[in-house]
Amino acid sequence: MKFDLMSMLLIISVSFINSINAQTEAGEDTLQITPPLQHEIALDPLDLEIGEMIFDETITKVGRDFYDEFYTNWNNPTQITDFSITIKEMPMPGIGTQITVLIDEYEILKQFIRPNQEMIEMLSEYTVGLATQYLVNYQEIQAQLQSEDQSGTGIF
């Protein structure tokens, strides 16, 4: 038995009408509207922040090795999470390369380095200590600014 498209649609619509009539005869509501599912999402602005980021803006293998060493040794000792560390590089032919490390656009280190693995490791360890000290000092200054001595009523 061969059916064309119109006859198939006719059969489907007849079976649908029969199922609606059967539900109506049984006393069931033919149109049931279910409320949309509501997802509870806690939108806390602090949850939307990315937090601590380390950016790699190096060009050469020496810069990439320094970034890898820094990233491997880095461990944030503070509760500060809203900062970024950027490691930039400017190649200097004949001299080596110049590494610049920034924390939130504040330059903490600018140093020439040669392609010597021991020197790269030593400079990265020194830079990790420097960045750690900068963040600890920053945290202490922020705590001092939040103290009662520094807060005022706004009345002169």
Image (cartoon, grey):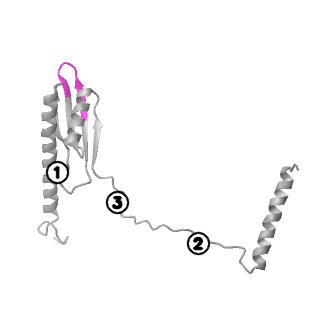
Give the residue displayed 36% in from the left and 64% down from the top.
44
Q: Label 3 vs label 1: CA separation?
A: 21 Å
Q: Label 2 vs label 1: CA separation?
A: 50 Å
Residue type beneath disc 1 = Leu
Q: Residue furthest right?
A: 1
- Comparing 13 with 55, the one in front is 13
Q: Position of residue 60 (x, y in %)?
A: 27, 27
* The stretch drawn in magenta includes residue 28: no
* The stretch drawn in magenta includes residue 89: yes
Give the residue displayed 87% in from the left and 48% down from the top.
2
Q: Residue furthest front?
A: 1
How many C-alpha atoms fall within 10 Å of the one at disc 1: few (<14), some, or many (≥20)? Answer: some
Query: Which range of residues does the magenta coloring cover?
Result: 88-97
Residue type beneath disc 2 = Pro
Q: Is residue 56 above or below residue 37?
A: above
How many C-alpha atoms fall within 10 Å of the one at disc 2: few (<14), some, or many (≥20)? Answer: few
Dot 1: element? helix
Residue type beneath disc 3 = Asp
Identify the residue position indicated by label 2 in the image.
Answer: 35
Asked where in the image residue 111 lies, by quadrant, the reply is: top left
Dot 2: element? loop
* Eye-nearest disc, 2 or 1: 2
Give the residue displayed 13% in from the left and 62% down from the top.
144
Identify the residue position indicated by label 3 in the image.
Answer: 47
| Mark 3 or 1, nearer chain start | 3
In the rendered structure, the answer to whether residue 96 lies left or right of residue 25 reads left
Q: Position of residue 70 (x, y in %)?
A: 20, 39
Identify the residue position indicated by label 1 in the image.
Answer: 135
| Mark 2 or 1, nearer chain start | 2
Q: Position of residue 95 (x, y in %)?
A: 17, 21
